[in-house]
Image: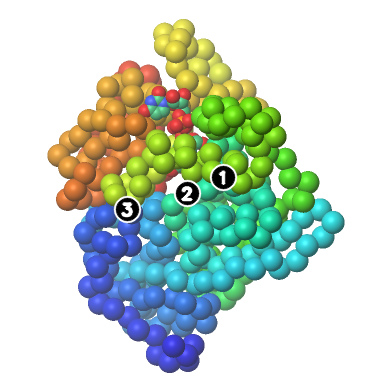
Amino acid sequence: MSQFAPIQFDAAYPLLAHNTFGFDVRARLACRIESEAQLMQAVRDPRAAGLARLVLGGGSNVVLTRDFDGLVLLIALRGRRVVREDDEAWYVEAAAGENWHDFVAWTLSQGLPGLENLALIPGTVGAAPIQNIGAYGLEMCERFASLRAVALATGETVELDALACRFGYRDSFFKREGRDRFVITSVTFRLPKAWTPRAGYADLARHLNADGASSAAAPTAQAIFDAVVAVRRAKLPDPLELGNAGSFFKNPVIDAAQFDALHAREPEVVSYRQPDGSVKLAAGWLIDRCGWKGRSIGAAGVHERQALVLVNRGGASGADVLALAQAIQRDVHDRFGVTLEAEPLCL
Ligand code: EPU
């Protein structure tokens, strides 16, 4: 389609295939975005004036509890390339609509290591910075250089660096002050040439060790990629088979005094001391201890192998999943005095 042709808006658009929980809801309007020019056109289109907007990439971090009474922008921007290199790093750019895992696999096929720990995370490149995806000892922000985005208010393009994105644990500017204000169109990653394996995460180290001493001693980026894929496949449900949005809750962070009191009562609590003295708790362990693992309320359930993942066992609504999430939050709070915060965006 030419970038000057009128952009197509579809009414009462079904979102079933656009959210990994598989909730059967509709958008008042939706349009597919294949270029920045189309995005600017859609944002300025009078048919969408005054409407709420929702950006959907892979739909892997959203809980749609009802029909969306606004315009859904389906991001289908494609393309990936090495934009430049210097003595220290390669800079690789990918369009927002690229599938994250395919992009990671492609970087490795080009001989560019650095993203392998983030293999198999569902979703798109454009969604990765929003919650600063992380897994197996690496957060996306450690490999981030900059991103391009279109400001919804003006339709203009901006470039933002890591400082402007204010990355935190599963957090960024786009979940706070920047919420609903920008549409990310591409992300540039900085992959250092001085690559060293990051293989310390318990599950990963166990898998690499089981695989043979040589690969464990000095694993290649490909060996780490393969191990991450194997560990994730063993533990986390594939959204194509069982609707889910990955971890439903963030791992809560509490202060040292609260942790000491909790630890005295619950000596087995799984915890990670943070550089600032605070302590991150494994929410999956807390939920598991409350007896929720494998349980369901109606068609909304807690995964059998990872209690942090809520699943749609077939025909659940977003409201069903939220009701289950609230029951879990209540139990965890009653037993541990800890508040669990949802990780996906609940609408
Ligand atoms: N645990 C239990 N029971 C459970 C689940 C976990 O006892 O049902 C215990 C485990 O035995 C382990 C600890 O809790 O000791 C941590 O579990 P795990 O290594 O599976 O990691 P997590 O903290 O539950 C986080 C991320 C995942 C990421 C893994 C690996 C968050 C919210 N989640 O999970 O990310 O894949 O670490 O790095 O930080 C996602 O964000 O969607 C996601 C899957």
Numbered disc in front, either 1 or 3: 1
Does residue 178 appear anywhere in the picture? Answer: no
Residue 240, numbered label: 3
Place of residue 85 in the rendered image (x, y in percent of width and height, measured from the top left): 78, 62
- Mark 2–mark 3 distance (CA, rounded to whole Å): 13 Å
Q: Which residue is mark 2?
A: 121
Camera-side residue: 19 or 184?
19
Residue at 21% in and 44% down: 313
Amino acid marked by disc 3: Leu
Residue at 52% in and 82% down: 37
Tag 3 secondary structure? loop
Place of residue 32 in the rendered image (x, y in percent of width and height, measured from the top left): 39, 75
**Left of 97 or right of it: where is 61?**
left
Place of residue 126 in the rendered image (x, y in percent of width and height, measured from the top left): 51, 61
Ligand 1 lies in quarter: top left
Residue at 40% in and 36% down: 234
- Mark 1: give few (<14), some (14-19) or many (20+) Cα within 10 Å: many
Tag 1 secondary structure? helix
Residue 225, numbered label: 1
The quadrant of the picture occupied by the N terminus is bottom left
Camera-side residue: 61 or 276?
61
- Mark 3: give few (<14), some (14-19) or many (20+) Cα within 10 Å: few
Q: Of callouts 1 and 3, which one flags the residue occurring earlier in the amino acid sequence?
A: 1
Amino acid marked by disc 2: Ile
